[in-house]
Amino acid sequence: MEREKKKKNYTPKEALIKAAAYCAYQDRTQQEVRDKLYSYGLEPDDVEDLIVRLSQEKLIDEERYAQSYVRGKYGLKKWGRRKIMQGLKSKGISDYCIKQGLKEIDFEVYEQNLLQLLEKKNATEKEKNPFARRQKLTYFLMSKGYENDLIQDALKRLEL
């Protein structure tokens, strides 16, 4: 006998409490919260009312979300600006919030990240042909989201 998993439908009041806990755990985008509220079986009007209320109570703050996203991606994962911007756009974050988030990047640390990635990749790259090697390193750094002019400067500094 197959057991169907019954999804509990919440009242707007119950959903508000659950959504507040969901947002308090970590920064969320409006879309993530909206999806979660719909999964509780709420009507579109109720969902939008709760989104507004959570925003007013600063439980959803897309600018704060963008800032923490940027700090995590460039600080821990060493992503470049282009990849970070694409990630934020894919999450439906506004251009204004993306700009505010990108202000979290310290250019010296950003350059340091780029050089560290380049040195690490250069040490493990097996390609002997200098032109092909340089191209492979460039593609690697571009895939990490770094800008081409910064990559070329870094390659010159590394004498490649």
Image (tube, rainbow, N blue to C red):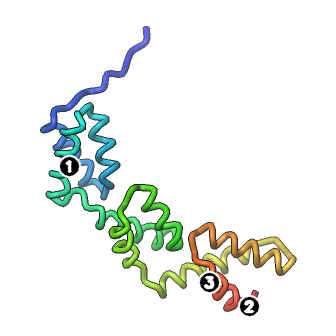
Which residue is tagged 2?
A: 159
Q: In the image, is residue 116 above or below residue 27?
A: below
Residue 42, numbered label: none
* Mark 1 in CB contact with mark 3 (< 8 angstroms): no
As helix, strand or loop, the secondary structure at mark 3 comes to helix
For label 1, the crowd category at 10 Å Cα-Cα, with few meaning under 14, some 14 to 19 and many 20 or more, is some
Residue at coordinates 48% horizontally, 83% vertically from top-left? 109
In this view, which residue lies farthest toward the top?
Answer: 1
* Res. 60 image quadrant: bottom left
Residue at coordinates 82% horizontally, 79% vertically from top-left? 131
For label 3, the crowd category at 10 Å Cα-Cα, with few meaning under 14, some 14 to 19 and many 20 or more, is few
Considering only order in the chain, which callout, 3 or 1, is on the residue closer to the N terminus?
1
What is the spatial separation of the Cα atoms under label 2 and label 1, in whole angstroms? 53 Å
Which residue is tagged 1?
A: 20
As helix, strand or loop, the secondary structure at mark 2 comes to loop
Give the residue type that dot 1 points to.
Answer: Ala
Which residue is tagged 3?
A: 149
* Mark 2 in CB contact with mark 1 (< 8 angstroms): no
Disc nearest the viewer among 1 and 3? 3
Considering only order in the chain, which callout, 1 or 2, is on the residue closer to the N terminus?
1
Q: Quadrant of the N terminus?
A: top left
Give the residue type that dot 3 points to.
Answer: Asp
**At which x and y percent is residue 34?**
29, 45
In this view, which residue lies farthest toward the right?
Answer: 129
What is the spatial separation of the Cα atoms under label 2 and label 3, in whole angstroms? 15 Å
Considering only order in the chain, which callout, 3 or 2, is on the residue closer to the N terminus?
3
Residue at coordinates 34% horizontally, 48% vertically from top-left? 32
Give the residue type that dot 2 points to.
Answer: Glu
